[in-house]
Amino acid sequence: MARGFLSRLLAPDASSGADQWQRMTLNRAVDSYLVKLGPANLSAVEISGDAHAGKGWREYASLNYPEFDLCAALTGQGPFDVVICEQVIEHVEDPCAAAANLRGLCVAGGHVIVSTPFLIRVHEEWGMQDYWRFTPRGLRTLLERASLEVDSVGSWGNRRVIAANLDRWPAYRRWHSLRDEPKLPVQVWAFARNPG
C-alpha cells in the first residue's frame, strides 16, 4: 500500500497524452516537425483526436478513430496537406490497409506523421482493440509498402519508463529520466511524404 502511494506521488497519473512521460520525447519531435512545416499555410487531419488542433492550421479536421474506420474505403475525406495518426496504428485490424488510407488522405507532396507504442502493455481502452507493435524498421517498412517516402524514423524509451507504464500512464515530472536506451523503445514514430 505504501509503495503504491509513493509511486503515485513520484509519478502521478497523466491527465492526457500531452503530459504522459512515455510521450514527452515523441511530442517534442512531432511539435518541432510541425513548426517547420508552417501550419498556417496547410490543411491538416488528425485521426487520433484533436491534440494538434490549436497549431494554427489554415484548415483542420479530426476524424476520431475508432468512429472513423481507418481500414475502410475512404469516402469524401481529404485530401489534406498533413495527416497525423498518433497511437492508432496498433489498434487497427489491418495496418497495411490503414497505411494505404493514410496515403489516400494526403495530397501529393503532403506529409504523414505516424506514432505507435512498442514496449508497452496491451491497452484496450475507449472501445479499441490492441493488435500490433512496430519496431522502427517495421514502421518504416509498413509505410514504404503503402508507397509513402519515409523521411525519418525515431524512437525513444528506457527501462524506467517501461516499468512505470506497466500498470498505468504516469505523468512526466522533471525528475523522470528522458535518457534514451535505443534498444528499449517505448515510442516509435515516422515522418513521411506522399510522393504523388
Image (spheres, grey):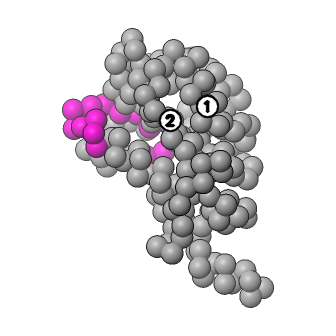
Residue 195 appears at what percent x and percent y? 40, 14
Which residue is located at x 73 percent, y 53 percent?
A: 121
Q: Which residue is mark 1?
A: 137
Residue type indicated by callout 1? Arg
The answer to which image quadrant residue 14 occupies is bottom right
Q: From the viewer's perspective, is residue 46 above or below residue 26?
A: above
Which residue is located at x 74 percent, y 49 percent?
A: 122
Q: Quadrant of the C terminus?
A: top left
Would you say residue 188 is visible in this rendering? yes
Residue 94 appears at what percent x and percent y? 69, 25
The answer to which image quadrant residue 160 occupies is bottom right
Residue type indicated by callout 2? Val
Which residue is located at x 66 percent, y 36 percent?
A: 134
Q: Which residue is mark 2?
A: 153
Would you say residue 70 is visible in this rendering? no
Write down the region rendered in magenta: 35-51
In this rendering, position of residue 131 left or right of residue 81: right
